[in-house]
Image (spheres, coloured by chain):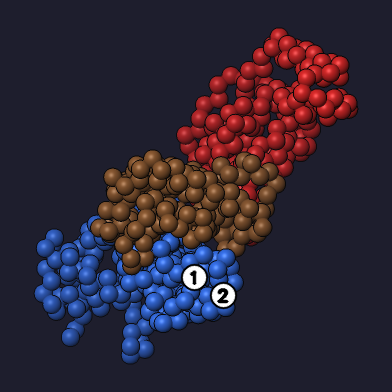
Chain colours: A red, B blue, C brown
Amino acid sequence: MLVSDAVKASGQALESTLSLGPKGILLAQSIVGELVRNLNAPAVEPASEFDTPTEYLVVTHDKFEFRIPVVDYVFNENDVWARVLDGVARVGISDYMQQKLTDISYFDPPKVDAAVEQFGELGSLESAKAVFEIIAPVAGNVTAVNPAVIDNPGLINEDPYGAGWLVEVKLTSFTQDRELLLDPAAYAEIVKRKAAEE
Amino acid sequence: MSPQTTKVGIISCSGEAIPEGTISRLATRRVLELLRPNATVTLCLPLFLAGNEAERNFAKTHPTITIDGCEKQCAKWGTEEHSGPVSSALVVTGILGTRAVGCHRASRDATQPDKEAVWAVAERIAAEVDTVLAETGPRDDVAAGSSGAQCSCSSPASGGKLIVLGVAVSIPGLPLIFEQCVERDIPADTGGCSALVEAVRIYRRILPEEETGYRSALLAAYQAFRSGPQPAK
Amino acid sequence: MGNEPIKNAVLVIPCSGIGKVHGLMSREATYLVTDELAPAQTDTLCLALLVKGDSEAVAAVRSHACITIDGCVKACAEKNVAMAGGRVAKAIQVAEAFKNHRGAKPGNATALTDDGWTITREIADSVACEAASLCASEEAIR
């Protein structure tokens, strides 16, 4: 939480003194209230353990190798993957996209509890090369954001299919969504085409 | 399977301590971005030396040119150490001679002579890329029968097929190579393997890690050749 | 350290990675330190020469404190200096510096923009401070 953000959100300017005036005290109380609510809120834990993939397709272009897990992962054409377990999809970006972005320095996550449509926005990533909007592969409600990548966005580059996951979404229409998603082999063809076009 | 388009790998020294290292680096970038963007791939020397498999594998399977700032030739050394022989090794001091005197390491100090030096080296690298590509031609790792190779008398040379490490390989003129080996009394046993490999190496690049596969494949083919009817001399 | 022996106390060694802007920034930050900010206290040497086992380069990293500047987490400079027996007094990663520069467009591996130079100068400033601190503590030369 940033106090400066809370000031902006309140729409009130604080007194310009070193000790808190009435407006400052009100704002402080409001911040305390929000902190207490957050503490008392049920913890939003990420869904059950997802196994780390062990088998990959490899698409090679020049000196680059792009890995694509062969089991349980589906992709959209925007280089975002989803992996479904117990009605929840874990979402991240592909190895191809993390290599294209190079060192990721920021992850702007969506809000927890936000509703998202398939092909809507699920936050964004920023690197020295580009800003990348994460296009949701599935529709649902955001239930978790990976705290590890908030603190260390480099995890996304290091392990895009495992520890570098981004968001979890409770699914609302996966049967429909699945029809517009690509299995690993089909996504591999997309990657080959994109790599050749660059 | 149609031949793949060959790209040439370029490894530049990083040469932090001398201006020629900066010239080497910038000239390589110029070739990659402007002069031969569709024919070249740059390999990162620090990553290469630190053990990156993707960089090393590319240099093993593609023709590679090194460009070094000085005669110590660190890029050439690193490539040969970890991937194999280079197709061409250039040195900035050899290309520029005294024109590198007065050049700068840091880009913020670059002057017109720096830029001209970079252009001169870049053009030299580009010419070398063209030469290497002309010599290498498209990759041919799949059996294709006669590859159309010709000997100096302009008669088509019959090809020979081997299976090396599970990959079908076509070696133009293999029967003629074997004939020479027979004339040199190279034995058709394990004692003759090295000589067979060296004989083929004149006509085809064999990487160090491929050598074991070539030894056994060539020996089997040579034994079959020697046990068959010999051509009239 | 081109063809001259190293004189100064602290060695600043960049990765100079050619593929990304971070490599260029590591290199230019090094030159800002050795040529402008702390020329009396710092020097640099060729990383590849060190990896090759050049005896002068190896002796230099073993007898001077080293500050490495790497473009990314692969940390080629830090790893190679450590493998050569050098003492890495401080390891800097350019990618970390971007965390304070949201939205910056630094350029590419060939040329830096104004944003890129701003971040590079910040890195160079912190390296120069570190070098001064090492010299002051007299740990630099063993």
Frontmost residue, A177 versus C27: C27
Left or right position of C53 against A86: left
Label disc, if present, on residue B104 of the rendered structure: 1
2 and 1 marks in contact (CB < 8 Å): yes
Residue A48 in percent (x, y) is at: 58, 19
**Looking at the image, which residue sits at the far right?**
A11
Look at the image and tell me whether residue B119 can be seen: no
Residue B209 in percent (x, y) is at: 29, 56
Q: Quadrant of residue A139?
A: top right
Image quarter in which the N terminus of chain C is found:
bottom left
Left or right position of A3 against B83: right
A150 lies above or below C113: above
Residue kind at label 2, given as amino acid type = Thr
Residue at the image point whose x is 40% and y is 82% from the top: B97
Callout 2 and callout 1 share a chain:
yes
Image quarter in which the C terminus of chain C is found:
top left
Residue B29 in percent (x, y) is at: 53, 67
Residue at the image point whose x is 51% and y is 55% from the top: C37
Q: Sequence-wise, which precedes: disc 2 or disc 1?
A: 1
Is disc 1 surrounded by few (<14), some (14 to 19) or many (20+) residues within 10 Å?
some
Label disc, if present, on residue B83 of the rendered structure: none
Is disc 2 surrounded by few (<14), some (14 to 19) or many (20+) residues within 10 Å?
few
Q: Mark 2 points at which residue?
A: B111
Residue at the image point whose x is 77% and y is 23% from the top: A18
B147 lies above or below A20: below
Circle 2 — which element? loop
Residue kind at label 1, given as amino acid type = His
Residue at the image point whose x is 34% and y is 80% from the top: B157
Look at the image and tell me whether residue C112 can be seen: yes
